[in-house]
Image (tube, rainbow, N blue to C red):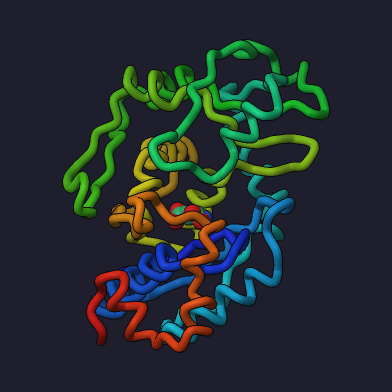
Amino acid sequence: MFVTRFAPSPTGPLHLGHAYSAILAHDMARAAGGRFLLRMEDTDLDRCRPEYDALIQDDLRWLGLTWDGPIHRQAPHISSYNTRLETLEDKGLLYPCSCTRSDIRAALAAPQEGVAFNVYPGTCRGRPMTSRLPGDALRLDLAAALTLLGTEDLSFTETGPAHPGLHRIDAVEAQARIGDVVLSRKGEEIVAYFLASAFDDADQGVTHVIRGEDLFDFTPVQVILQRLFNLPTPIYHHHRLIRDAAGKRLAKRDDARAIQKYRAEGATPADIRRMVGLPNP
Ligand code: GLU
């Protein structure tokens, strides 16, 4: 059974880029006779708003998309994601980190195009968990994790247009490009977006992850986490990004491209499909 999902963060209105992602995933699921799930990735308690959650649902319905089953929201599960992290702690793969908040915040936030991770220099690596202070973040000791995984198959299949094929994760390259990522920020108990997303894809039985090309660089770390937690690896499909007239990726702040605005101007769902280059059913 083909199972995919649309997983927006309700930090702003749905814009053309999200509409493309949602319609594509929906249409692929329906064509395969599979399931299309909706997941609100609302772990960033500072920026997520219930108004946006409601608006996103309203726009998706207006676009003619229906999702299967109830909406899954992450915020109520933050403490259970943190509990699951203890498995890694037991394996000695986590360490507390007190490096600057802006560094940690950047590592936890949704990615910007072209910048996946700020590779951490390892300043706090080797600190025992017993030295953890209330404001400390938790980092994955990637070298130790890769050693533990040994000869396990670290590969994933990509079907998107930019990098189709089988991708094998190389340990040396992973350390150079990913490094010791932040998995959780204590104090506020916020778990990294890519970790919550990896847990949920497994828990929701997602077989195909369909999402924007800007998230391609996050896939290797998600695959490493899947192996560490014994979770299955879905097939990935990173789609092209919808850009503005200047060729820049659309972001939440691009309210000018908000679906609400097109709706107010009288556009139809068929117009939106045409604008993002998707066929009408
Ligand atoms: N929540 C992420 C976003 O809004 C998408 C996560 C995913 O599709 O894996 O960009």
Q: Quadrant of residue 132?
A: top right
Residue found 60% across the figure and 13% down from its top: 125
Q: Position of residue 230 (x, y in %)?
A: 44, 43
Q: Position of residue 226 (x, y in %)?
A: 43, 42
Task: State whether residue 233 appears in this view.
Answer: no
Asked if residue 269 is positioned above or below residue 246 in the image, the reply reads: below
Q: Position of residue 112 (x, y in %)?
A: 47, 42
Q: Quadrant of residue 11?
A: bottom right
Viewer-closest of 119 and 153? 119
Q: Quadrant of residue 242?
A: bottom left
Residue found 68% across the figure and 19% down from its top: 99
Residue found 43% across the figure and 47% down from its top: 231
Task: State whether residue 182 appears in this view.
Answer: yes
Left or right, 256 with respect to 243, comes to: right
Residue found 64% across the figure and 43% down from its top: 191
Q: Position of residue 115 (x, y in %)?
A: 43, 34
Question: Which quadrant is home to the C terminus?
Answer: bottom left
Asked if residue 238 is positioned above or below residue 57 in the image, the reply reads: above
